[in-house]
Image (cartoon, grey):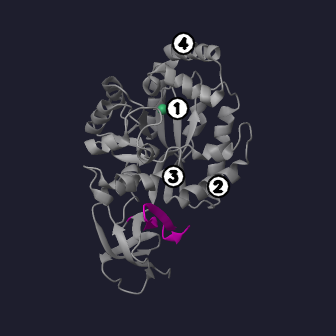
Amino acid sequence: MTRPLILENAEIVTAEHQFRGYLVALDGRIIETGEGAAPEKGQDLEGDYLLPGLVELHTDHLEVHFMPRPRVEWPALSAVLAHDAQVVGAGITTVFDALRVGNDYDDEKFGARMRKLAAAVADAKSRDITRAEHFLHLRCEVSCADVVEEMEPFLVDPQLKLVSIMDHTPGQRQFIDVSKWKTYYAGKRGATEEQLNAIIQRRRSIWDKYGIINRRAIVERCQRKGIALASHDDATLEHVEEAIQDGMHIAEFPTTVDAAIASHKAGMKVLMGAPNVVRGGSHSGNVSARALAEEGVLDLLSSDYVPSSLLLGAFTLRDAAAIGGLPGAIRLVSKTPAEAAGLTDRGEITPGKRADLIRVAWDQDHPVVREVWREARRVA
Ligand SMILES: [Fe+2]
């Protein structure tokens, strides 16, 4: 018979409450929690927090490990394992690795690279060598002519559980101000003003031709397959209306307070970047996540481009009005993202759920991940 995992003297944070007590898990599931001493001797957590393992829906960090320098392609499996170590060390036990389809950078190897990464994630998963559980989040750029064709091979991949629809055409949504697009793109690609203007022209004409058709085709495919959908960078009430019509579950990075309020009211889960919380604002000058939290319309956080921001972001927001203290702040990075992506077996410390758990010490002014368990198995 397998031995139970017993953790005691822990500051346990459930979806609604916080108390000093113990937890018992067996065969990968939580079977009991309670206040005070454990029924039999367990591991003493010395008063540290015991939180649900974090659930990350949108990280592009895998690409960073795969291309650690421009034009340097690292072996994909090695990149997956390095990325996995970083996310699990940040307290993330379920991660949706974001891969992009729709090539907006004139890079012909782009699609092949994304497929190679998806294959490496599947390989690592089948060998059971990752510590966090990995799924895929496909980010589809509708302003690219080839996006639907490029997404097809991913649709048969059982790891794919979330698709977001993006439109980064200069002059739209995140880049409603074209000069911001120019700064971002020039920084990324080192293009001249003339080249940038030519790209803007081309991207706009592609959007005119394919933008709406592509969006329809992607929504239709995801609905048929039962894959959760996310809208991206909604800025106006028209964008939100369109997302509602398309049956979207998540509103990623709404750029205005009005769009966030309307999305939340319509039942979509409003996702903002944890780096936005940690830095005190958006890197592209859009709405602040804290402002949405204070407004009561922030539902979940994502680490976006810095894995360690997820836990730090949640702790940073625990004093925000309308968040509901630490339990509410932790829900932003555990229960709500799990449910929004259709994973109802995890994300919360309660009997019956998976024993995905993290031990976190509060050191002066910073949360420190000290131990991580996935399905009661110690993984970090
Ligand atoms: Fe965006």
Q: Which residue is mark 1?
A: 140
Question: Is residue 323 found left or right of 233 in the rendered image?
Answer: left
Q: Amino acid at mark 3?
A: Val
Q: Which residue is mark 3?
A: 95
Q: Give neighbour class at mark 2: few <14, some 14-19, many 20+ (Cα, 10 Å).
A: some
Disc 3, SS: strand
Which badge, 3 or 2, comes first in the chain's sequence?
Answer: 2
Q: Amino acid at mark 2?
A: Ala
Disc 4, SS: helix
Query: Residue 205 — which label?
Result: 4
Disc 1, SS: strand
Query: Residue 82 — which label?
Result: 2
Looking at this view, is 131 or 27 the one in front? Answer: 131
Residue 311, position in %: x, y?
44, 56
Which badge, 1 or 2, comes first in the chain's sequence?
Answer: 2
State the CA–CA distance, disc 1 to disc 2. 25 Å
Q: Which segment did they paint magenta?
A: 353-380
Which badge, 3 or 4, comes first in the chain's sequence?
Answer: 3
The residue at 49%/13% (across/down) is: 208
Does the residue at mark 1 contact the one at mark 2 (Cβ under 8 Å)?
A: no
- Name which quarter of the figure residue 55 lies in: bottom left
Residue 30, position in %: x, y?
39, 70
State the CA–CA distance, disc 1 to disc 3. 18 Å
Which badge, 1 or 4, comes first in the chain's sequence?
Answer: 1
Which badge, 4 or 2, comes first in the chain's sequence?
Answer: 2
Q: Could one spot residue 170 in this view of the protein?
A: no
